[in-house]
Image (cartoon, grey):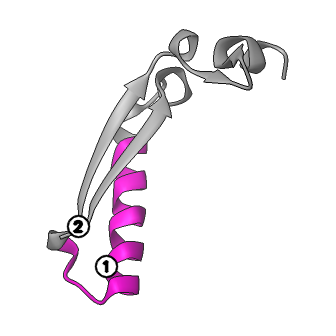
Amino acid sequence: MPFVNIRIVKQVIEKDPDGIKAKVQADVTASLAEAACIPAENVWVTFDEIDEKDWFSGGVRVKELRANS
């Protein structure tokens, strides 16, 4: 039974967290089920929402990277 853990910056999905998570999990579930030839109900998907101030890339806070882009 595959278990997929998705870590995402909380602020990226803040406008519609339930809708975005529903779409992402449905797409991930369908893709993995098809690729592995397993029933979709055997695919588990979880989300970890990380605040942008707690996530770093190359030593820079994602909050700062997002502000500069």
Residues rendered magenta in the picture: 20-40
Decide whether residue 52 is among the magenta residues. no
* Residue highlighted by disc 1: 33
Residue 18 lies, in percent from the top left, at: 33, 36
Q: Residues within 10 Å of mark 1 (few under 14, many from 20)?
A: some
Quadrant hosting residue 36? bottom left
Judge whether 16 appears above or below 4 on screen. Answer: above
Judge whether 65 appears above or below 38 on screen. Answer: above
Name the residue at 44% across, 22% down: 50
Name the residue at 56% across, 9% down: 53
Instruction: Spot the residue most to the front.
Output: 59
Q: Amino acid at mark 2?
A: Val
Q: Secondary structure at mark 1?
A: helix
Numbered marks: total: 2
Residue 44 lies, in percent from the top left, at: 21, 59
First in sequence, mark 2 or 1: give its number: 1
Q: In the picture provided, is 45 more to the left or to the right than 21?
A: left
Q: In the picture provided, is 60 more to the left or to the right than 50?
A: right
Q: Which mark is residue 43?
A: 2
Name the residue at 35% across, 32% down: 48
